[in-house]
Amino acid sequence: MSLLVTGTIGIDTVETARDKAENVLGGSAAYFAFAARLLAPVRLVGAVGDDFPTAFRDALNDPSIDTSGLETRAGSKTFRWHGKYLEDMNQRESISTDLNVVAEAPPAIPESFRDSPFVFLANTHPAVQYGFIDQLDSPGFVVCDTMDLWINEFRDDLLKTLSRVHGVVLNDGEARMLTGKDDLFRAAQAVLDLGPTLAVIKKGEHGAMLVTRDDLLVLPAFPTSSVVDPTGAGDSFAGGMMGHLAATNRTDIAAVRSAIAWGTCAASLTIEAFSVDAIRAADREALARRLARFRSSLAFD
């Protein structure tokens, strides 16, 4: 089944304690699309400026990614982000963020995309997110992402979006910030009170937690000794998760539990290189092999 993603497509500069990558392809929708396309066809909606490199556009023109929803706006500039990771890669600082085209009117969802049964609203202003929902015909399963900025400064808009989605993906700090609860399980339950039927809490190197009214799943991160660039890990996680659901055309709890594992493995591939290079180079077989190793590592009597 077709999977629609809306979000940022940008140009990143990323620094770590050991290396630096300048002016590379980034953005939430880009990471999501490269991960999800390993499992299901992706419909991409976003906007870039006329400074968007041809090489990046060529990279996005993957056979499993439909880029007919990608707008190029004459006279506009592409979203840019410059970030620096500390020695502890769980910590980073944003050196600069240039919203550029993201500060303009959001792109419209093409008519041919509006029947998408699976939809992921990657991180952007919550008012834009529910504006996208209004453009859809009758989506079967909608999941959104969010961040601390929207929680702190646009809470009413975020609550409106959460009341209209089936699921939400957010990190542990954001879950606590949104609900005011320190205990992560109680925070996830409080998120469900806001409307979603499932909450996925990302815990970085400590894995992820899925909470519904009747179910709980806690998975560790896939162990990898090659962490090069954590940027896009969360978006790739969401891509693997939603890609599995779209591929199986299922949203029952068993499918969602499996989807969390697929997402975990997709994220682990992404962090092994700067930008989208590692997840773009991967194929479904590579992801499936990693899932098999992950499943084996969790088995016990």
Image (cartoon, rainbow, N blue to C red):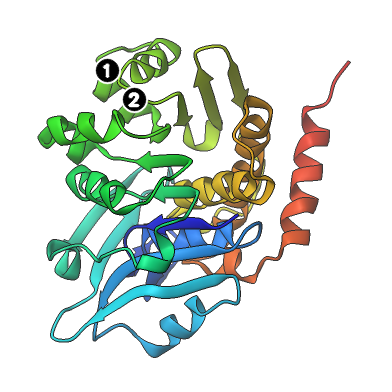
Q: Residue at x 25, y 68 (%)?
A: 80
Q: Residue furthest right?
A: 301
Q: Which of the two residues, 244 or 81, is positioned nearer the viewer here? A: 244
Q: Quadrant location of the N terminus?
A: bottom right
In the image, 84 versus 150, the foreground residue is: 150
Residue on which the image places disc 2: 175
Could one spot residue 22 in this view of the protein? no
109 vs 272, left or right, is: left
Residue 80 higher or lower than 247, as above or below: below
Residue 75 drawn at (x, y percent):
13, 85
Determine the image quadrant of residue 250.
top right
Q: Is residue 55 left or right of residue 301?
A: left
Return the x and y of residue 239 as percentages of the image width and height: 53, 51
Amino acid type at mark 1: Thr
Amino acid type, callout 2: Ala
Residue wearing tag 1: 179
Residue lying at 41% horizontally and 18% vertically, measured from the top left: 188
Question: Where in the figure is residue 79, as x and y percent of width and height?
Answer: 24, 68
Q: Residue at the spot x=47%, y=60% of the render?
A: 31
Give yes or no for contact between labels 1 and 2 (Cβ–Cβ under 8 Å). yes
Relative to residue 45, is residue 194 depicted above or below? above
